[in-house]
Image: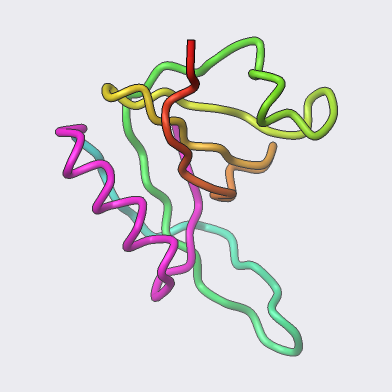
């Protein structure tokens, strides 16, 4: 899994805290791309972790076919990204 988050953003903090809490090893590095934010560009950070991708995407998370990717954490929580790897949300486990 490779996810892009803002270098100084709350999404980065939330993702890293979740990975640490779940005991998932990760690597953090400077992303080679920037995201446009109004009239300026914002630096992104790349977070890499070895998590299984959920396929097919559960209907609770799929806005349309191929719109998101989903990664499963050990607790069953889900990390949802857009197709470019930008963090969308971290969700609780899917009820079975």
Question: Which stretch did the figure color magenta?
Answer: 1-24
Query: Position of 88 compared to 31: left or right?
Result: right
Residue 26, magenta (yes or no): no
Please name whichever residue, 43 or 20, is drawn nearer the observer in this view of the structure: 20
Image x and y of residue 2, in percent: 46, 38
Query: Position of 89 compared to 84: left or right?
Result: left
Image x and y of residue 54, in percent: 53, 15
Residue 9, magenta (yes or no): yes
Compared with 15, 48 (above or below) is above
Determine the residue positioned at 69% across, 79% down: 37
Where residue 83 sits, quadrant-wise, is top right
Determine the residue positioned at 28% across, 52% down: 16
Query: Position of 32 compared to 69: left or right?
Result: left
Compared with 76, 35 (above or below) is below
Where residue 66 sits, quadrant-wise, is top right
Compared with 29, 44 (above or below) is below
């Amino acid at each position: 899994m490779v996810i892009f988050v803002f270098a100084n953003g709350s999404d980065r903090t939330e993702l890293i805290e979740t990975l640490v809490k779940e005991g998932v090893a990760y690597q953090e590095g400077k992303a080679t791309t920037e995201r446009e934010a109004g009239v300026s560009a914002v630096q992104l950070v790349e977070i890499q972790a070895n998590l299984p991708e959920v396929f097919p995407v559960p209907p609770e998370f799929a806005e349309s076919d191929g719109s998101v990717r989903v990664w499963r954490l050990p607790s069953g929580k889900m990390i949802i990204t857009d197709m470019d790897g930008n963090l969308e949300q971290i969700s609780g486990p899917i009820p079975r």
